[in-house]
Structure formats: structure tokens, C-alpha cells
Image (cartoon, rainbow, N blue to C red):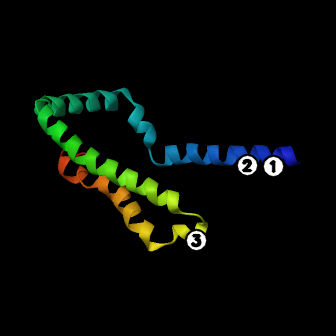
Amino acid sequence: MQRKLSKFLILLPIAGLVGAFFACDLQLCFTLEYLKSSQQAFAEFYDAHHNRPGVYCLVSQFEMIPGTLLYNHDGTQLGRIDSLFGISLPDYHSPLTCSTLFPCLPEGSSMPSGVA
């Protein structure tokens, strides 16, 4: 009885994932035509934008330096928490929110049209 229940609990999420895969028509993404069209679109985008390595370096530095500072600050704040109640203190919420939202800021301006 216990063995049948454990098998069922293992197979249930797998069956759910397979069902969701087909319900969302994700099998269409694995056809040869789709892969070829994606390859063509990527090649066109690369040809239009491959000559800007300086922009990439500047944007990378713009993101890495503040990201490193936020990461170090968050580590310091985590080290000060001595109980579960400490997580709910407002001193920790603003750095955590900044660390979560900061990587999302530059993506809106650097995304190519048609890619979301």
C-alpha cells in the first residue's frame, strides 16, 4: 500500500508536467522548421548588432559594480540575522529588494524588438 502511494506521488508531477507541455503546445518549439527560423532570426540580429563590443563592456561594468556592492551588503545583513524574526526587520528588506530588482532594470532598454 505504501509503495503504491509513493509511486503515485512520483508519477503525478511527471504526468502533470507532460500534460502541461502538450497543453501549452510546447512541442511546436522542437520542430525543424521552428529551429531553422530561429537560427535565421538570430543570424539577422547578430549581423545588425555584432559591432558594439564597447557598449557590452560598459553595460557589464555598469551592472557588475553596483551588483557586487549589493551582494556584499546583503551578505553582511544576512550575517546579522540571529533568528527567524530578524528576517522580518525592515533593515533587511530594502537591500534585498534592490538586489532582486536591479538586474531587471537594464533589460528593458537592451532587448531587441520582438524578443520578450
Give the number of the disc on residue 9: 2
Of the two numbered discs 3 and 2 in the rendering, the one whose residue sits closer to the viewer = 3
Mark 3 to mark 1 CA distance (whole Å): 37 Å
Q: Are marks 1 and 2 in contact (CB under 8 Å)?
A: yes
- Give the residue displayed 37% in from the left and 67% down from the top: 94
Q: Position of residue 113 (x, y in %)?
A: 18, 46
Tell me the kind of residue under disc 3. Answer: Phe
Q: Secondary structure at mark 2?
A: helix
Q: Are marks 3 and 2 in contact (CB under 8 Å)?
A: no
Q: Secondary structure at mark 1?
A: helix
State whether residue 36 is above or below residue 13. Answer: above
Q: Earlier in the sequence, mark 3 or mark 1?
A: 1
How many C-alpha atoms fall within 10 Å of the one at disc 3: few (<14), some, or many (≥20)? few
Location of mark 1 (residue): 5
Location of mark 3 (residue): 85
Q: Position of residue 16 (x, y in %)?
A: 60, 48
Residue 116 seen from this side: no
Mark 1 to mark 2 CA distance (whole Å): 6 Å
State whether residue 109 is above or below residue 80. Answer: above
Q: Position of residue 108 (x, y in %)?
A: 22, 53
Q: Are marks 3 and 1 in contact (CB under 8 Å)?
A: no
State whether residue 33 is above or below residue 76. Answer: above
Q: Quadrant of residue 50?
A: top left
How many C-alpha atoms fall within 10 Å of the one at disc 2: few (<14), some, or many (≥20)? few
How many C-alpha atoms fall within 10 Å of the one at disc 1: few (<14), some, or many (≥20)? few
How many discs mark residues in the rendered view?
3
- From the viewer's perspective, tell me whether residue 108 is left or right of residue 7: left
Residue 20 seen from this side: yes
- Give the residue displayed 19% in from the left and 47% down from the top: 110
Tell me the kind of residue under disc 2. Answer: Leu
